Amino acid sequence: MTFPGNLFLFLRKSVVGLRKQLKLDRETPPRSLWPQTLLILCAVFLAFSPVLRAGFLQWDDTTHLLYNPFVYSLSWDHVGQIFQQTINNTYVPLTVLSFTVEHHFFGMNPGIFHWTNLLLHLFNTALVTRIGLKLGLSPRAAVLAAFLFAAHPLRVESVAWITERKDVLYAAFYLSSVSLYLNYLKKNAWGHYAGSLACGVAAVLSKPMAMSLPWILLLFDGVSGRKFSRRMVLDKIPFFVMIEPLAWITAHSLGKNIQFIFPDSFGYFIWSFSFYIPKHFFPLQVFPLYVPPPPLTSGILSYLPAAGVFAAFWTALLVLRKNRWFAFACWFYAGSMFFLWRWDVADMNFVADRFIYLPGLGWTVWLGYLIDKGLTRARGHRFYHGLALGCLAVVLGGMMIKTFLQARLWRSDKDLWAYTLKYRPDNAVAQKKFLETRAPVVRSGFDFSRYEEAAARDPNNPEVYYRRGLELFNHRHLALAFADFNRCLALNPRHAGAHIKRGQLSAMRQDVNAALRDYDQALVLNPRDAAPYLNKGILFFEQGEVSLARDLIEQAISLEATSSPAYFYRGRLYAQESKFESAAAAYDQSIKLSKSFIDAYRYRAAALVSLAKHAAAIEDYRTILELNPGDDSAANELGVLYLGQKEEARAMDYFSRAIGINPYYKRAYNNRGVAQIRLGHYESALKDFSQAIRLEPTDFRMYITRGDVYYVMGREAAAFRDYQSAIHLAPQQAVGYYKRSQVYQRRGRLSQANRDLETARALGM
């Protein structure tokens, strides 16, 4: 039988097993569970109570809430804009709308936002109880499943972090959709079907993870004993049609940079699939960020535990496919988060506790069933029954304590990242986040509601929208700024300033033609204004039209001789033509007109380096650090210059300073490693190169450099692995083959060495 046929038979046998137990489990109708449900809700509330005293976090609470202008107005027009925007490339309009409603009635009070998260979590807990009963769990099993779901330490991130309102809100709609769908299956009531569909759409508008709902409903069809039919397929079509396109908005934005590199991507897939399973059953160390292992080509040992879990999962499912609740747990896990199993390490969110908030439900249902079954069997033996109850109380109590302590960590950024670094001191992202805790969390630098009130008082005044657009532009809320400039021009098409600003925004969006139209219109309205010439010149410069860019920038300088940006771009043009003396002179003039123009110092320093005027370049980078002590790039470049002058100790100081500013700075680790080599500190160099690889595991050059250190130290096996990784990552680069040939030669494997040398020559070495 072919692979699809085997898979279908496997699924069919699993569902048959589910059906057989379904009738047995439903023989006795459950009594009212309100007292028990209320009891577990109180216990869950107690476990999560520390979050009610928490504040805002710098980690994304600023982006989603404090600095988000969408939150500051509840007008109908503004609500419409919420449904047209994304936050961090994620389409979550209902989540943002919930923040907006809270701010409208209660202001920017962190306690209110935390209360809402916790209440939604409690609502989800009650829904889990109801769904468990509808699936045929005994009352005790349903209550246990709900408690295991709600009080689990892995739920803390989703509840305690205001930003993750997405999780608890989408889960509320998702579980409501499932509950209504089960009513539809039982009563054949189309009103429940419509309600299920509406809740499904609301779920995906709260978080794109709800894209799994149509697939999960197919699983519930099987669990509920529904036979495969045409109607079973047809009633999922509206779910697919209405949910998947909304989820695609986010998937399209976040999936653009995904890279598949064999076999490393396969290793990442296995690791991310397996990560959550042992973590769910043994949540001993729970962190906000987890670091993935190095690429598979760097060594297979890091992946062996994950491979074991992966194999055990599918083997157990094959063997226990007729076990109703175990099969349900496995398929629910696979069906609700298959799109989160990663192929690359493009960002820090490789795996996260919040991703398992709802997909972990299947495991808790299975555990609730197992515990209930065990207690039932032990009922006739007083000693064993008491022992089982005692063990259960210890486990559940320990879980509550762990959740309580974990919730306390989320009260502040400092507590959260200090805890992470205590157990994971090499986590570079956590180091960076901990350093960021020095800056206080503040509200946005402008009061959006004030501008909203001004627009309400005088809705036909274009200047109101222009000024608000400028504020939004300066605070980097570009989509809103674009909308305001459009409104301004709709009311006054002759507003030159709005044309210029809208042109800049169009240029940022790579809409060159729209930008040029706005700049040209601004010139028609005011031909003596230097700004349109300068902006057109910048646009042509970025498009590689050097001649046109030069003419326009020179025209801007002739109209406004005090324009520092115009001289800056004159310098950029000269530098592109390798006329570094002229470039430096242009940067001089730009700096003379604007003493705090950091980029002018930066580019002048680069021009001076090209002219071998290293002392002057060093002074420019020092000036940058005086203007902005947090400029990691300037610190790194100073280290490079001192390294070039063979002042390794001073270079080390600046590389360390760059890393202190930005622990996520790969180049600084690499450069400091080079300095360590020159000082003969090979072990320290290896640590720096290893950190650089953790931060950028797909850069083949990092493996070459670290491999060279291993080779010099006589650690041939480690050097060979690194050269092997470099070849896998960049098979068209000759250097990897050449380096590997050296290891083969040292080992006396001359035929392999010669083959690698021939490959290197064929590739141009």
Image (cartoon, helix red, strand yellow):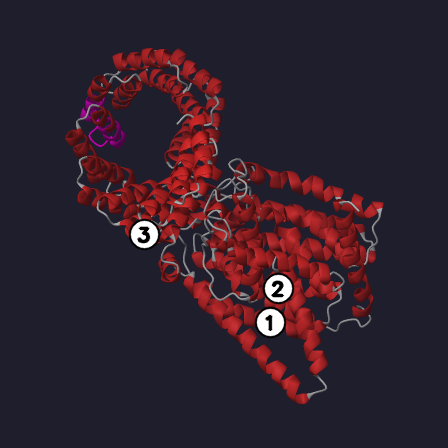
Secondary element under disc 3, as helix, strand or loop, is helix
Q: In the rendered image of this protein, does residue 195 appear above or below residue 583?
A: below
State if disc 3 and disc 1 touch (CB < 8 Å). Answer: no
Secondary element under disc 2, as helix, strand or loop, is helix
Query: The C terminus appears in which quarter of the rendering?
Result: top left
Question: Which of the two discs, 2 and 1, labels the residue nearer the N terminus?
Answer: 1
Q: Amino acid at mark 3?
A: Leu
Percent x, y of residue 264: 52, 44
| Of residues 542 and 576, the one drawn nearer to the viewer in this rendering | 576
Query: What residue is at 71 percent from the left and 84 percent from the top?
Result: 379
Q: Which mark is residue 435?
A: 3
Q: Which residue is mark 1?
A: 40
Q: Magenta residues, as a range?
A: 587-605
Percent x, y of residue 234: 80, 43
| Of residues 600 and 107, the one drawn nearer to the viewer in this rendering | 600
Label 2 to label 1: alpha-carbon separation: 9 Å
Q: Quadrant of residue 30?
A: bottom right
Instruction: Say whether residue 288 is left or right of residue 11.
Output: left
Label 1 to label 3: alpha-carbon separation: 39 Å
- Furthest residue toward left: 615
Percent x, y of residue 742: 38, 39
Front of the two marks 2 and 3: 3
Q: Which residue is mark 2?
A: 125
Q: Residues within 10 Å of mark 2 (few under 14, many from 20)?
A: many
Q: Residues within 10 Å of mark 1 (few under 14, many from 20)?
A: many
Q: Amino acid at mark 1?
A: Ile
Question: Which of the two discs, 2 and 3, labels the residue nearer the N terminus?
Answer: 2
